Image (cartoon, rainbow, N blue to C red):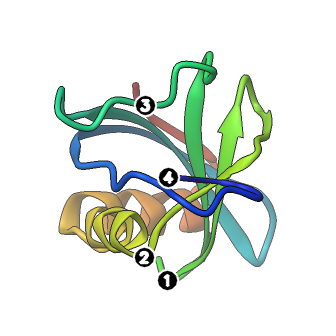
């Protein structure tokens, strides 16, 4: 993770993701991720309730990744390697199917927290 303005950072290794999928509107589906990281790459101490919101198309394509702390934008951004780990998870069959289901269903919310 990279804190805005810092020149040094650490690369988090994600061990597990818990997710919630929610259709926002006729164009976007939001996937909120709670993460479990390796003991060797802990989250920064100043994060209280870290999540990542992945904004996807109705076809399941990730468009934007937003870091959140307590539900608000936070001062950290993801490294390229962290983004790659998240996109790989979002593109897994389980998550892509959940996105497709939320996009095409009256049940707009699919929770895996």
Position of 86 with respect to 33 (left or right) is left
* Nearer to me, 14 or 19: 14
Identify the secondary structure beneath mark 4.
Answer: loop
Where in the figure is residue 9, as x and y percent of width and height?
48, 55
Q: Give the alpha-carbon distance from disc 1 to disc 4, as whole Å.
A: 23 Å
| Residue bearing mark 3 | 43
Q: Residue 69's image quarter?
A: top right
Relative to 43, does residue 21 appear above or below in the rendering? below
Q: Earlier in the sequence, mark 1 or mark 4?
A: 4
In the depicted view, which residue is nearer to us: 101 or 96?
Answer: 96
Mark 1, other Cα within 10 Å: few <14 / some 14–19 / many ≥20: some
Closer to the chain start, of discs 3 and 2, is 3
Q: CA distance from mark 4 to mark 2?
A: 9 Å
Looking at the rendered structure, the secondary structure element under dot 1 is loop
Q: Earlier in the sequence, mark 2 or mark 1?
A: 1
Locate the C terminus and report the quarter of the image it occupies: top left
How far apart marks 1 and 3 lie (CA) works out to 27 Å
For marks 4 and 2 on the same chain, the one whose residue lies earlier in the sequence? 4
Q: Nearer the viewer, mark 2 or mark 1?
A: 2
Disc 3 is placed on an element classified as: loop
Residue at 50%, 29% (x, y): give it: 44
Residue marked by disc 2? 80
Residue 1 tag number? 4
The residue that mark 1 highlights is 61
Q: Quadrant of residue 6?
A: bottom right
């Amino acid at each position: 993770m990279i804190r805005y303005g810092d020149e040094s950072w650490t690369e988090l290794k994600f061990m597990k993701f818990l997710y919630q999928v929610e259709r926002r509107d006729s164009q976007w589906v939001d996937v909120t991720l709670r993460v479990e990281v390796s003991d060797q790459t802990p989250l920064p101490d100043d994060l209280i309730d870290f999540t990542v919101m992945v904004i996807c198309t109705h076809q399941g394509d990730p468009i934007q990744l937003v870091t959140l702390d307590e539900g608000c934008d936070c001062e950290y951004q993801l490294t390229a390697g962290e983004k790659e780990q998240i996109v790989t998870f979002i593109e897994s069959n389980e998550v892509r199917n959940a996105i497709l289901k939320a996009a095409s269903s009256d049940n707009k919310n699919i929770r895996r927290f």
